Image: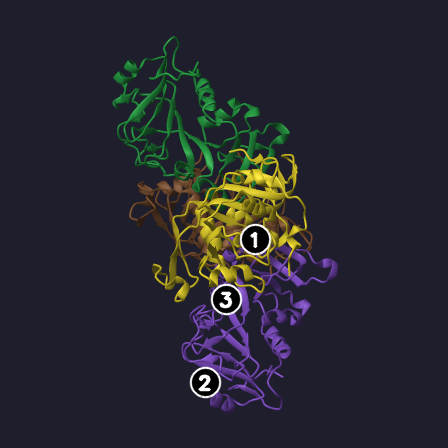
Chain colours: A green, B purple, C brown, D yellow
Amino acid sequence: MTATGNTPPKGPVEHTGRGPLTTEELAARVARDIPAGSYVNLGIGQPTRIAEHLPPEAGIVLHTENGMLGMGPAAVGDEVDPDLTNAGKVPVTEMPGASYFHHADSFAMMRGGHLDVCVLGAFEVSARGDLANWHTGDPDAIPAVGGAMDLAVGARRVLVMMKLFARDGAPKLVSECTCPLTGAACVSLVCTDYGIFAPGPDGVRVLETYGATVADLRERLSVDLLT
Amino acid sequence: MTATGNTPPKGPVEHTGRGPLTTEELAARVARDIPAGSYVNLGIGQPTRIAEHLPPEAGIVLHTENGMLGMGPAAVGDEVDPDLTNAGKVPVTEMPGASYFHHADSFAMMRGGHLDVCVLGAFEVSARGDLANWHTGDPDAIPAVGGAMDLAVGARRVLVMMKLFARDGAPKLVSECTCPLTGAACVSLVCTDYGIFAPGPDGVRVLETYGATVADLRERLSVDLLT
Amino acid sequence: MTTTIAATADEAVADVEDGSTVLVGGFGLAGMPFDLIDALIRQGAGELTVVSNNAGNGDVGLAALLAAGRVRKVVCSFPRQSDSYVFDELYRSGRVGLEVVPQGNLAERIRAAGAGIGAFYCPVGVDTSLTQGKETREIDGRSYVLEYPIKGDLALISAHRADTAGNLVHRKTARNFGPVMATAATTVVAQVTDIVPAGGIDPETVATPGIYVDRLVRAEARGLTVRGAR
Amino acid sequence: MTTTIAATADEAVADVEDGSTVLVGGFGLAGMPFDLIDALIRQGAGELTVVSNNAGNGDVGLAALLAAGRVRKVVCSFPRQSDSYVFDELYRSGRVGLEVVPQGNLAERIRAAGAGIGAFYCPVGVDTSLTQGKETREIDGRSYVLEYPIKGDLALISAHRADTAGNLVHRKTARNFGPVMATAATTVVAQVTDIVPAGGIDPETVATPGIYVDRLVRAEARGLTVRGAR
């Protein structure tokens, strides 16, 4: 599905003989972008689903910011242990080679740039890679940030996994975020149902599209798309 | 030997029917000033000897800055383990209830004010409690500070154990330190062969003398002695 | 000074004063010191500032303390949860204050208090509303915000096992804030499931050294952490 | 990325470049990575800046590296020891530079590099010659000095046992700088006495998580730490 030949294509790969990616397909697509041997933090929500698509032989190690490396799949039945949860407070399991540490050590690990990849959900991402994923800006909302800001600065590559359009059709890849920022210019790659985008100081480069052409997306987005 | 009656004396206790304290007597005297249950760091050199005079039933826990609480006596014979030394690199032993931690955690423990007492040697202590114990000021000397400055700020009470006079007879309790400082106004109590002194913003208060009267000491010291 | 063993959780928190800042361990329900919080509710101290990762779940633990009207302000990273209705109601009606701190900054600021660090430059939250008004500095081409320590009068934490020297071992991700909060409060109380004699814990495995722990109390029952969980 | 197991110490340090900053674990001889230092001497990189607590004992380890003329500067807390004659001679003849750092500041500055802290205010050494010229600040009535991170291109450490995931457990006071230095260098190499399969180390006891360790090598022999000891 993706271009993996010896000669990389010059422009974006347009997958038009199909619809946009389903959430499960998107999770699988993001999983393929995570190199073997990486240390990875998967944010709460949709990014959690990526774990199921990571090939066991790739030796990818999952970090959960509440104090663990080597997190395994969600716990089922007798595996459930109230002392072992992920950052979303869901009971999980432990892989061989795991380790536990306290919160200050866990966030030092993130802040110090030791994670290779983190994947986060988002309300909005700007063309230069600003991330907004902690607060809608609704004045009535109770603010709650958790580890979102720490994660935004805390991995060598910050990937966003989100739908390209909100339910009302408004694009979530924007010129300027309208929601309060989580981090500035921190996103390396935006993975969406309609395409994969690389934001940066020069603008948004399209790497792949799904169920749409670049031309289609140019009509629906207000950001310039580089190819 | 010390005044432990119900009515504390108004002035210093002069122990004149004897000579100045030997090093061993001084170590025992300092040991009596360490409350039961204290967490204590004993500096390299003479202060190390205090350990032998701490009553086992007092439950005093020794810290060594190279990463251990619950340090036991020096190791002998088969007990010697190159992986278990004190801050002076002397092989030591482990007490029940010990714990190990890395250097950053060990010095966080000190810097954070969690030790009740540390006892250090000194070249000089000033009337206000400045400590000089890391460098003689000799321009040819190779500077080496180790944990001295960390210890000087790193205990609730910093006790100095030293001889009151250098070999050449010069007093080591002085108006102003001539050696480079280890810490400013950090010493709570100066325990010497000739007496016990409490430095402070108002000057040096004499608590006890050994083998000399306060009047004798006033003749030999250039600091004002409060009584 | 020496760690003491309290006969009951009530005894362990008998001297808490109104207006105290209380660091409360736990992440969600894992590592939450339920017995100690319940005792604090019975003890009655009010006008508390609570520092914790969350602001209570369901009707238990921190949520119960909030419901009892004892908390003036919550300092936390993530108050809003699907079952934080007690906090939500108090907050919306203006009866409790809130300071939201990024989770890692919360941990590092607590560590700083315990480690004698006066303040530190942190790259988290630069150019966001949560650091507005804070001092910033460029260091080696990167922007940082100056963050200050968070110190408690009291820390209430939970651990797996203690020895009589006060050393604690934790269990899995229930370790979370416990070892850090233990360094940063004037009085530290830990509830544990078991207390063994000194020497009964391998010194290499101690996550919270006894020097940080003032009082121990046996938790009435293990598994409390699932009471009211969802 | 994944921890690799090198067949020899020589292979583990084959790519060290001239001018590198090398963090070297150990406190005196305890925790000193002798095999790795010997391999570094054979490898030949020069103009090194060495960051370590001491500046070598006798003729082994760091002292041998210094004697081979590979070190431009030593950053340490305590160079002067009864058997530091190699360093002493080089220093007195102006052939090696020296930056003396209080021991706890050395550890905390290395931690800061590993923890993404830009700088921190530290109360140690205020009003002493070792902090002259450094920025100071009064915070809550106490004076602090601004201290900056110390980062390495390479860290050479020693540990007791590793698993194939790179997790390390240390032994007694030989732990010292190892876990902290492992967080603060671009490439981290650990010599260990034993490597067990992932799952062979209790996850609660890991002092240096595998994420920090790039290369492992089995030490040729345990007990090296007493060679030349005094």
Q: Disc 1, disc 2: CB below 8 Å?
A: no
Q: Position of residue C1 (x, y in %)?
A: 57, 63
Circle 1 residue: D64
Q: Nearer the viewer, mark 1 or mark 3?
A: 1
What amino acid is found at the position of numbered circle 2 in the picture?
Leu
The quadrant of the picture occupied by the N terminus of chain B is bottom right
Vertical placement of B130 versus C122: above or below?
below
Say how many tags the image has.
3
Do callouts 1 and 2 point to residues on the same chain?
no
SS assignment at label 1: helix
Q: Which mark is residue B156?
A: 3
Q: Position of residue D160 (x, y in %)?
A: 64, 46
Residue at 42% over, 76% down:
B178
Most foreground residue, A52 or A9: A9
The subunit carrying tag 1 is D
* Left or right: where D110 falls relative to C133: right
Classify 10 Å Cα crowding around label 1: few (below 14), some (14-19), many (20 and above): many
Q: Position of residue A176 (x, y in %)?
A: 26, 30
Do callouts 1 and 3 point to residues on the same chain?
no
Mark 3–mark 2 distance (CA, rounded to whole Å): 23 Å
Q: Which mark is residue B226?
A: 2
What amino acid is found at the position of numbered circle 1 in the picture?
Ala
Mark 1–mark 3 distance (CA, rounded to whole Å): 41 Å
Question: Which quarter of the figure has residue C30?
Answer: top right
